[in-house]
Image (cartoon, grey):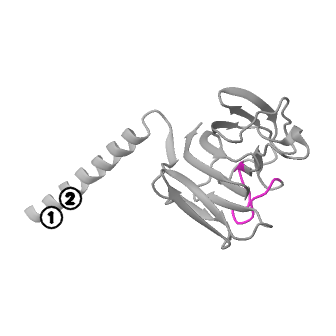
Amino acid sequence: MKRGTTFVIALLFAGVGALQYLGTAVAQDGWITLFDGKNLDLWEAAATPEVSYAIEDGSLVATKKDPKKTHFLVSKQSFKNFQVRAEFWVSNDANSGIFIRCEDPKKPGAKTCYECNIFDTRPDPSYGTGAIVYHAEVNPMPKAGGKWSTMEITANGRDLSIMFDGQKVSQVRSGLHTEGPIALQYGEGTVKFRKVQIKQL
């Protein structure tokens, strides 16, 4: 083998080692950042040309052009067993949510994903903020409007649960949806996401 070829191979192995170290450093506690307030490289819109997404002051903000439609930002990667936590701010009249294990990334919804709701003014509050719509009711319902809050969702096999600002608010056992991407919903009002992280189990 020529000396030049040996040198190139050595550089390649050094580069791979550096990348492996970087990956370990980024996720050394098990948490991987899906949105860090800087870019949307790990997300794509679910066929929603009516919405434009912007990053302002480290937060994801959506501008909706059609008030009659609900829109989603979907993770490019699919997940099975995990914990996901998100920091968000919504107005009192907002309708939002975090959808998990979505079967069809192009058409997220409460029937094709588990919808972890953020909706203080839902007509039926049992499936309002902190509930898993159609699967786990919440009582009492926590309020999300007008403040930064944290939602942590655990999906481990059939066991699903939601922690809202450090308190468990709902849980259920269900095997309806087993794997799929995560979707951030923008329905109405003002919705901002500041950080989204995931830890695979």
Nearer the observer, 199 or 129: 129
Which SS type dominates the magenta stretch?
loop
Q: Amino acid at mark 1?
A: Thr
Give the distance between the C-alpha atoms of the residues marked 1 and 2, in whole angstroms: 6 Å
Residue for badge 2: 9
Quadrant in the rendering for residue 64: bottom right
**Residue occupying image coordinates x 82% and y 39%:** 174
Asked if residue 198 lies left or right of residue 155, the reply is: left
CB atoms of marks 1 and 2 within 8 Å: yes
Q: Residue furthest right?
A: 124
Q: Which residues are magenta?
A: 97-110
Instruction: Name the residue at 24% across, 57% down.
Output: 12
The quadrant of the picture occupied by the N terminus is: bottom left
Q: Position of residue 39 (x, y in %)?
A: 47, 58
Task: Establish if 23 lies above or below 44.
Answer: above
40, 15: nearer the viewer: 40
- Secondary element type, mark 2: helix
